[in-house]
Amino acid sequence: MNIHEYQAKALFATYKIPVPKGNVAFSADEAATIAATLESAVCVVKAQIHAGGRGKAGGVKLAKTRDEVIPFANEILGKILVTPQTGPEGKEVRKLLIEEGADIQNELYVSLVDDRATGSIVIIASTEGGMEIEEVAEATPEKIIRCVVDPVLGYQAYQGRSVAFQMALPKEVIGQFVKLLGNLYRLFVEKNATQIEINPLIITGDNRLIALDAKVGFDDSALFKHPDINELRDLDEEDPLETRAAQHGLNYVKLDGKIGCMVNGAGLAMSTMDVIKLAGSEPANFLDVGGGASKETVQQAFQILLDDPNVKGVFVNIFGGIVRCDRIAGGIIEAAKEVDLNVPLVVRLEGTNAKEAKDMLAASDIKLIVADTLWDGAQKIVAAVT
Ligand code: GDP
Ligand code: MN
């Protein structure tokens, strides 16, 4: 789960990570009220969406006087921002962060992420803040500093000093930087984060470190331990079909292709997507109905697939183990009664009670194409949608 910059900054503040003074606004009036409470007349008006790259897309404006805040707020609120991270459809701006302008001397980059190779949290830092870090890594990999934190020992101050020296930070900020990394590490571990990114982390004219941007992602599977974090969820920022799927315990990720897939087991779902690509088309989603899917879950899954306007055909690929094939067939028959099945449907059922399932489907009046193998099914659905 991701949160907004203003929420991440509030969380930073509770971990003694320095952030600019500011607050969230839902209207231009509120923006003006907040600006009036700030000490500096120079304010920054920042679009709050779950995506980076806002600066270049016109979502971050520097108001030289408090009076400029209102027109900037009016300009950004309600705007659809398109950044490299939003996808071509963009994201609507529903709220703004109004904060004090900072005196930027230097822009740095710091992030913490899970490193699967070492099973540890890794600190990534660079002097090249304020830019796309992927581009820095590509063009000048020597400017990216990595520091793996031993999960048993935890973060050690010497590691922070080592990173600071490699970045040649001015001596006035080294102590602050070492503490900042320690606080970030503590936040990461205590709140089960999966990623924290500050880009830019700035050094001000009077040598203070301030997090000017803040991005934090959390491990969905650990959210039950953190009701305070779970409360920060913003469903407006999430795909409505994915939200619905999660409510029904379905493992669903929306993609851009036109073949809806209903599969049991993550591994089989991945191979199904691969084979669809091999057969010359693209999957519209990843969907694992899980090991214990009931008739109702299957029905819900079907509805979610068909509610995606991109879906031009559905491929059901079930290997009956714990989920019996006849249960899936029952779900398909129920779903077909409820929804208007106006796209081709290819069904491949194999394993426990496959024969009973095929008989049930044959006895129903649903229009479907039966497939015998994964490859056969993929070819049939691709042929049916093209
Ligand atoms: P992003 O583009 O979505 O990553 O948004 P950021 O929060 O990183 O803001 C983009 C850029 O706006 C930053 O890299 C800064 O250069 C600039 N910016 C943000 N806040 C301030 C500020 O207080 N003063 C000044 N001068 N620039 C700022
Ligand atoms: Mn940024």
Image: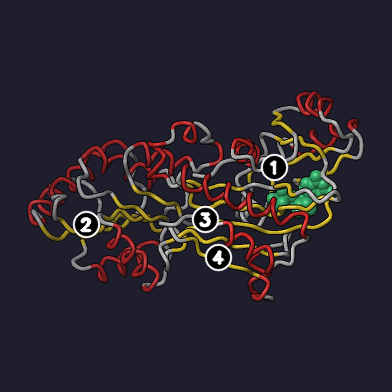
Residue at which label 2 appears = 318
Q: Callout 1 environment at 10 Å: few (<14), some (14 to 19), or many (20+)? A: some
Ligand 2 is within 8 Å of the C-beta of the residue at disc 4:
no
Q: Which element type, helix, strand or loop, lies under badge 3?
A: loop
Q: Which one is earlier in the sequence, the residue at label 2 or at label 4? A: 4
Nearest-to-viewer mark from 2 and 4: 4
Give how far apart the Cα atoms at labels 1 and 3 are.
Answer: 19 Å
Residue at which label 3 appears = 155
Give how far apart the Cα atoms at labels 3 and 4 are.
Answer: 10 Å
Question: Could you tell me which residue is drawn at 52 percent across and 61 percent down?
Answer: 122
Residue at which label 4 appears = 147
Disc 2 residue type?
Answer: Ile
Q: Contact (CB < 8 A) between labels 1 and 2?
A: no
In the picture, measured across the screen, residue 62 lies left or right of residue 342, that is right
Disc 1 residue type?
Answer: Pro
Ligand 2 is within 8 Å of the C-beta of the residue at disc 3:
no
Q: Is residue 104 visible?
A: yes
Give how far apart the Cα atoms at labels 4 and 1 are.
Answer: 22 Å
Give x and y (percent) for residue 185. Answer: 53, 50
Give how far apart the Cα atoms at labels 3 and 2 are.
Answer: 46 Å
Question: Could you tell me which residue is drawn at 15 percent across and 60 percent down?
Answer: 350
Q: Which one is earlier in the sequence, the residue at label 4 or at label 1? A: 1
Q: In the image, which disc is placed on residue 18?
A: 1
Give x and y (percent) for residue 70. Answer: 84, 31
Q: Contact (CB < 8 A) between labels 1 and 3?
A: no
Instruction: Locate residue 267: give its quadrant.
Output: bottom left
Disc 4 residue type?
Answer: Cys
Disc 3 residue type?
Answer: Tyr
Question: Could you tell me which residue is drawn at 87 percent across and 39 percent down?
Answer: 63
Give how far apart the Cα atoms at labels 1 and 2 are.
Answer: 52 Å
